[in-house]
Amino acid sequence: EVQLVESGGGLVQPGGSLRLSCAASGFTFSSYWMSWVRQAPGKGLEWVANIKQDGSEKYYVDSVKGRFTISRDNAKNSLFLQVNSLRAEDTAVYYCARFRGRTDFDYWGQGTLVTVSS
Amino acid sequence: QSALTQPRSVSGSPGQSVTISCTGTSSDVGGYNYVSWYQQHPGKAPKLMIYDVTKRPSGVPDRFSGSKSGNTASLTISGLQAEDEADYYCCSYAGSYTLVFGGGTELTVL
């Protein structure tokens, strides 16, 4: 059974940083692109970033470029999102998702909440 | 990377059909046959319902169907059931390995 479990969210002040993690199991992690998708409270979904199987390609939504970094550790079946220079508008549940390509996120975690507030 | 436009809400009675639209531009919806639809129940993670405009993943009922014309994609749910009540999001490829979601549509089964 495919499982994705996020962790690392919490309350952080504007300008602060967090490192989000996603532990994957039930599939060959190194064979898939992976993604982060976020959802602000009461709002819609927003694609944040994708990373290729070997980490050699990474893509981001414009609003997080230069502030967020996606990475992975295939030996530990783990996906990460380093979020820096946080703003109030980054407050959201951050979902880890397995990405099949095109626009297909076929498995999702339950999300981790990041709250940016002073 | 502007969000795709979806109606804020739609509704229908059990057994009826509803259609949810998703309007973008020639740079996203209209430029590629890469549109997917996600169902999200309150407090739950999204679920893939349609991909590549018209394809259904294994396990998704054939009551769910997708289509596209020009810059607008559509999700049609026929034979509405109570469990279909949820939020629905479209997602399109937007070029240069980027993706864009719609703002979401709340479906109410009356």
Image (cartoon, coloured by chain):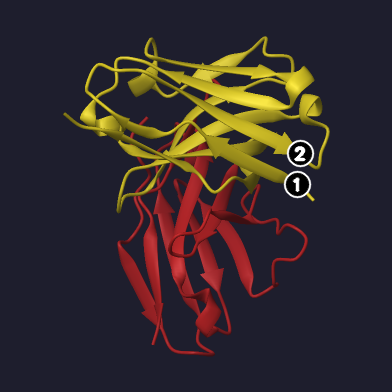
Chain colours: A yellow, B red
Alpha carbons under labels 1 and 2: distance apart: 6 Å
Residue A105 is labelled as none
- Quarter assignment of residue B77: bottom right
**Residue B36's x, y, as percent?**
58, 49
Say whether residue B88 is left or right of residue B97.
Answer: left
Picture layout, residue B88 above or below residue B24: below
Picture layout, residue B91 above or below residue A47: below
Give the residue furthest to the left. A118
| Residue A56 visible within the image | yes
- Of mark 1 and mark 2, the one earlier in the sequence is 1
Picture layout, residue B46 above or below residue A27: below
User: In this figure, which residue is indicated by the disc labeled 2?
Assistant: A25
**Residue B28's x, y, as percent?**
47, 35
Say whether residue A45 is left or right of residue A30.
Answer: left
Say whether residue A39 is left or right of residue A30.
Answer: left
Residue, x 38% and y 55% (percent of image)? Answer: B104
Residue, x 60% and y 32% (percent of image)? Answer: A22
Q: Local crowd at mark 2 within 10 Å, few (<14), some, or many (≥20)?
A: some
Q: Local crowd at mark 1 within 10 Å, few (<14), some, or many (≥20)?
A: few
User: In this figure, which residue is indicated by the disc labeled 1?
Assistant: A2
Residue, x 22% and y 30% (percent of image)? Answer: A88
What SS does tag 1 mark?
A: loop
Q: Nearer the viewer, residue A18 or B7?
A: A18
**Residue A78's x, y, as percent?**
67, 26
Q: How many marks?
A: 2
Quarter of the image with the C terminus of chain A in it: top left
Q: Amino acid at mark 1?
A: Val
Task: Verify CB contact (< 8 Å) between mark 1 and mark 2.
Answer: yes
- Quarter assignment of residue B11: bottom left
Residue, x 54% and y 49% (percent of image)? Answer: A110
Report whether mark 1 lies on the same chain as mark 2.
Answer: yes
